[in-house]
Image (cartoon, grey):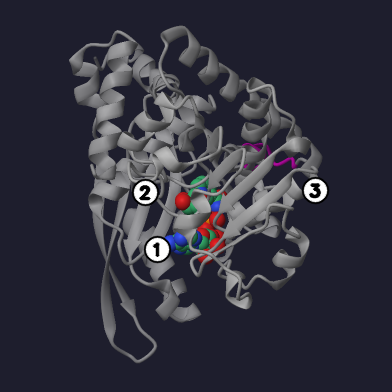
Amino acid sequence: MMDLLRSTQSIIKSALQKLGYSNDMYELLKEPLRIITVRIPVRMDDGTVKIFTGYRSQHNDAVGPTKGGVRFHPEVNEDEVKALSIWMSLKCGITDLPYGGGKGGIICDPRNMSFGELERLSRGYVRAISQIVGPTKDIPAPDVYTNSQIMAWMMDEYSRLREFDSPGFITGKPIVLGGSQGRETATARGVTICIEEAISKKGMNLKDARIIIQGFGNAGGFLAKFMYDAGAKVVGISDAHGALYDSDGLDINYLLERRDSFGTVTNLFTNIISNKELLEKECDILVPAAISNQITVENAHLIKASIVVEAANGPTTIEATKVLDKREILLVPDILASAGGVTVSYFEWVQNNQGYYWSEDEIDKKLRKVIVDSFDTIYQTSQKHKVNMRLAAYMVGIRKSAEASHFRGWI
Ligand code: NAD
């Protein structure tokens, strides 16, 4: 299995070739323009000082300021941060936002840190990267194990450093500090819209559809609720502990009420199956919304769904994508399906800049238009160039960075 950076680069190469760009353009876009490594000393609660390593990667700022989340995780590494910043360029290109891609990360385990330690780490990170970020340079956001409280501390630190209030420095903030309505549900809303579009392409009806969702956290949980409320039959869900399947449909409200804050609920049941078994169960739509590398060459030929919508990042390997293609399963790729989050982050930044705030209804309408248009452009591109939706998404996603770099005279 290729690692994330290598596989991203290989698809970008194919996408640029299809678009008729020279190899020079690939050489420019295959790596971030800028990545910094920072060392952050943090006074721990026991009085000792621990030095944390963090990164901030800016893939390409030809289109506009870079944008992307900051993750706190023990497995953060430089290559992953680089690849994820390239993905952000692709997502912003797909959704036609005026940004390039950025990403940050700190090697740490927030599950074993106190509130005070996390606050000092968050503020230290902002001080360490403050020269290269800002509302018109590079705008961070939440990602794995970071949340609105961490965004609030980071925004406060940046505002103290610059000596003026800077809500547009970061998105995913609490509403009272300039956060946007609809940010929490944005990813699941985006996935929902992609499912509706994919279903209509296949001539199916959402009310008759049976759906399996792997992962019952922020993305999977809200998605299950939206699908259930729309009258679809959610026949399977899962979490890190196991999976539940019922061909008559699960009671999603009941499960959501009992879910814990880590997105776990299946531990309360005895009739559970494994995540592996769940992916191979009867359904029309399969949504991996948990972790990467879940659909591989080992199980791609066993999947019963006719539509796979990737809410998680990288749930299907390159090799498995080929198997799904051959079987004519419609795959809506991650960089499209999970673009709802960055889109509403953009709306948050726009609202911060204009100082005028929209209602949840307005946000939902604006988000729907962006995702429907993006889906349509990618679907048309895939038909026109006779390529799968993943390659089409990369073609649409990378085109803006390539065109902007060209107009600026860089290539
Ligand atoms: P989360 O932490 O809220 O929930 C993760 C869920 O996955 C939990 O139910 C957990 O139990 C389950 N899980 C963990 N390990 C598992 C395993 N080995 N097998 C099966 N299930 C497992 O995370 P989230 O925010 O819902 O993110 C889920 C995926 O969606 C990730 O790949 C993330 O990168 C992607 N994503 C999320 C957002 C967002 O805004 N939340 C945006 C873009 C992409």
Q: Position of residue 318 (x, y in %)?
A: 32, 35
Identify the element where label 2 is drawn.
loop
- Residue 237: quadrant of the picture: bottom right
Query: In terms of secondary structure, what is the magenta stretch mainly?
Result: helix
Q: Residue at x 19, y 24 (%)?
A: 27
Separation of marks 2 and 1 at Cα, in angstroms? 20 Å
Q: Nearer the viewer, mark 2 or mark 1?
A: 2
Residue segment shown in magenta: 350-357
On the image, which quarter does residue 253 sit in? bottom right
* Other residues around mark 2 within 10 Å, as few (<14) / some (14–19) / many (≥20): some
Can you identify the residue that label 2 sits on?
293
- 319 left or right of 196 in image: left
Q: Nearer the viewer, residue 164 or 72?
A: 72
Label number found at residue 229: 3
Q: Earlier in the sequence, mark 2 or mark 1?
A: 1
Q: Is residue 183 above or below residue 42?
A: above
Near-viewer residue (378 or 280): 280
Provide the secondary structure element on which disc 1 rests. strand
Instruction: Sort mark 3 into few (<14), some (14-19) or many (20+) by Cα contacts within 10 Å.
Output: few
For badge 3, the amino acid type reads Asp
Image mark for residue 317: none
CA separation, marks 3 and 2?
29 Å
Magenta segment: does it hold 351? yes
- Mark 3 sits near ligand 1, with its Cβ under 8 Å away: no
Could you tell which of marks 3 and 2 lies nearer the N-terminus? 3
Q: For this rendering, which residue is in front, 12 or 67?
A: 12
The image shows residue 395 at horizontal and vertical percentages of 40, 19
- Asked whether residue 34 is in view, the answer is yes
**Residue 164 can be seen, yes or no:** no
- Assess disc 1: are there few (<14), some (14-19) or many (≥20) residues with their C-alpha within 10 Å of its C-alpha: many
**Residue kind at label 1, given as amino acid type:** Phe
Residue 374 in the figure: left or right of residue 303: right
